[in-house]
DNA sequence: GGCGTGATTGATTGATCAATCAAACATTCA
DNA sequence: TGAATGTTTGATTGATCAATCAATCACGCC
């Protein structure tokens, strides 16, 4: 029964953190909704932050099985997988009435860098996400332009997803999400046909865009190095 | 002095809501940091939510002068303006050590639809943002493909910005932001050259991507109709 | 000088916050 | 049967929460 209780707590906490944020969720409410007494909750999670960490660790565990693998199972086509993944988020938005998108995105913006352990977990979550999509894009091989930075494109996909989810939640409508994803689709299809034409006129000149942004294309994948603030004083804007 | 006090409160509140979120910020802390007594704060803002609304109204007021207009002033080129705008956000990330990006994005994810007035304000903020960028894109005229949905592209730009800011904050690095924006740049440059070629072979066949997604291109701009949740029960994921 | 009005003060409210604790309970193995 | 370990109970802690209140202050107008 111990496992059940712990899981029940994590279920409720995950949902509430997702809907109301971390600071906006009271421990007492989690207890009540999970049918658990306060001492019992603190038996498994010695602090509220530990509870948040538990929730994030579970999100990280389930990222593969319940999200990436599902998208991968939807189709063999690596490009199709990208949009299958986006469609999972779309479906989650839909069934929740545009209330819940990515469970980690909220927390990412909320906790900032106040809690290092939490930030690291979220950073890891995004990294796994991006790496998986990058893997798919690499599988696409020469269907995509040779010089294209697969990791940067994967980052774009994640950015579009998070930003689109944000707007869909605010607008309480799937339209912003669909619009953004449709544009992403246009971009990737453009890349596909660009690579197709490039294959014919092999060794031909690189596209204007590729020339212009050669310096940002296919850079080495260095670990993200935290930057420190250098602002002397804060000014409103 | 009255105006000063109110502005001082709004300054502090805006900053703290941005950094720690709404629920994560205590009114007492705002009072202390603003050098104001509790009664004085509640004289101007009858509730914490009223304070949040005041902050958002000011963000909305300043969206034009301190953000859109600045980007528009940077260059006459409508496409250049888009990236000038993104660069403003990049600069804000940089000077804050990747702690602060869009002051509204956080609140958008946090409050959800609990407070209707707040949601409406945030929705309005995003709408103004998107409409302005759409205006620029329209100014670009036939430099962009004729069938391209300018509003959807503007939505994409906002999505990329918000999503990229989220990742930059989590990673404490500008790299994710730069990668995502670089990809967006590639897309838009592709659109530009696509329109350029299209101009030559005028009346030629539409691109494969445009054919595939014709149904999502240039749809009428309908107001966002809130969707209601239809989920019978929530399940963890 | 007296009056009115809005701004300011700061103590105080009850509620809720995260967290603690000793005691009771359940389960397992000796 | 009984000790041991792990789990659950629920009252309780002090701190902090948003919000209220009567009282005082500064300042313009008649």
Image (cartoon, coloured by chain):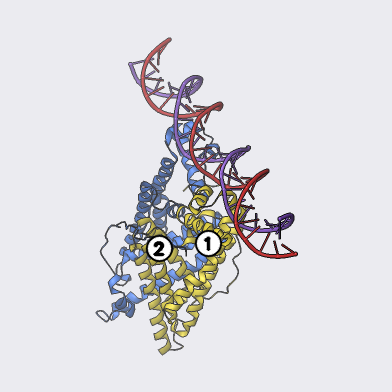
Chain colours: A blue, B yellow, C purple, D red
Mark 2–mark 1 CB contact (< 8 Å):
no
Please state which of the two labelled residues, at mark 2 or mark 1, is closer to the viewer.
2
Q: Nearer the viewer, residue B130 or C13?
A: C13
Q: Nearer the viewer, residue B215 or C12?
A: C12
User: Do callouts 2 and 1 point to residues on the same chain?
Assistant: no
Asked where in the image residue A140 lies, by quadrant, the reply is bottom left
The residues bearing labels 2 and 1 have C-alpha atoms spaced at a distance of: 17 Å
Mark 1 belongs to which subunit? Answer: A
**A84 up-or-down from A3: above or below:** below
Instruction: Give SS at disc 2.
Output: helix
Instruction: Give SS at disc 1.
Output: helix
Q: Nearer the viewer, residue C26 or B142?
A: B142
**A14 up-or-down from B208: above or below:** above
Task: Judge whether residue A14 can be spotted in this image.
Answer: yes
- The count of marks equals 2
Asked where in the image residue A43 lies, by quadrant, the reply is top left
Residue A93 horizontal/vertical position (percent): 52, 57
Image-based side of A206 in relation to A172, left or right: left
Residue C16 horizontal/vertical position (percent): 56, 40
Mark 2 belongs to which subunit? Answer: B
Q: Residues within 10 Å of mark 2 (few under 14, many from 20)?
A: many
Image-based side of A23 in relation to A64, left or right: right
Q: Which mark is residue A168?
A: 1
Task: Judge whether residue B228 can be spotted in this image.
Answer: no
Q: Which mark is residue B166?
A: none
- Pointer 2 residue: B164
Residue D28 horizontal/vertical position (percent): 66, 64
**B129 up-or-down from A104: above or below:** below
**C24 up-or-down from A173: above or below:** above
Q: Residue at x 47, y 63 (%)?
A: A236
Residue D23 horizontal/vertical position (percent): 65, 44
């Amino acid at each position: 029964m111990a496992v059940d209780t712990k899981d029940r707590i994590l279920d409720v906490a995950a949902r509430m953190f997702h809907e109301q944020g971390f600071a906006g969720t009271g421990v007492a409410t989690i207890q009540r909704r999970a049918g658990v007494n306060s001492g019992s909750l603190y038996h498994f999670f010695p602090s509220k932050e530990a509870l948040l960490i538990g929730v994030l660790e579970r999100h990280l565990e389930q990222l593969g099985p319940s999200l990436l693998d599902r998208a991968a199972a939807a189709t063999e086509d690596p490009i199709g997988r990208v949009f299958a993944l986006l469609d999972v988020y779309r479906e989650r938005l839909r069934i929740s009435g545009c209330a819940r998108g990515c469970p980690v995105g909220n927390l990412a913006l909320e906790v900032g860098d106040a809690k290092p352990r939490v930030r690291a977990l979220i950073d890891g979550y995004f990294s796994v996400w991006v790496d998986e999509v990058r893997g798919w894009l690499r599988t696409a091989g020469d269907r995509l332009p040779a010089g294209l930075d697969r990791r940067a494109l994967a980052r774009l996909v994640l950015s579009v997803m998070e930003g689109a989810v944000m707007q869909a939640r605010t607008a309480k409508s799937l339209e912003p999400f669909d619009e953004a994803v449709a544009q992403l689709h246009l971009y990737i299809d453009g890349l596909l046909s660009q690579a197709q034409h490039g294959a014919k006129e092999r060794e031909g000149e690189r596209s204007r865009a590729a020339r212009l942004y050669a310096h940002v294309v296919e850079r080495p994948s260095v670990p993200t190095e935290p930057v420190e603030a250098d602002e002397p004083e804060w000014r409103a804007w």
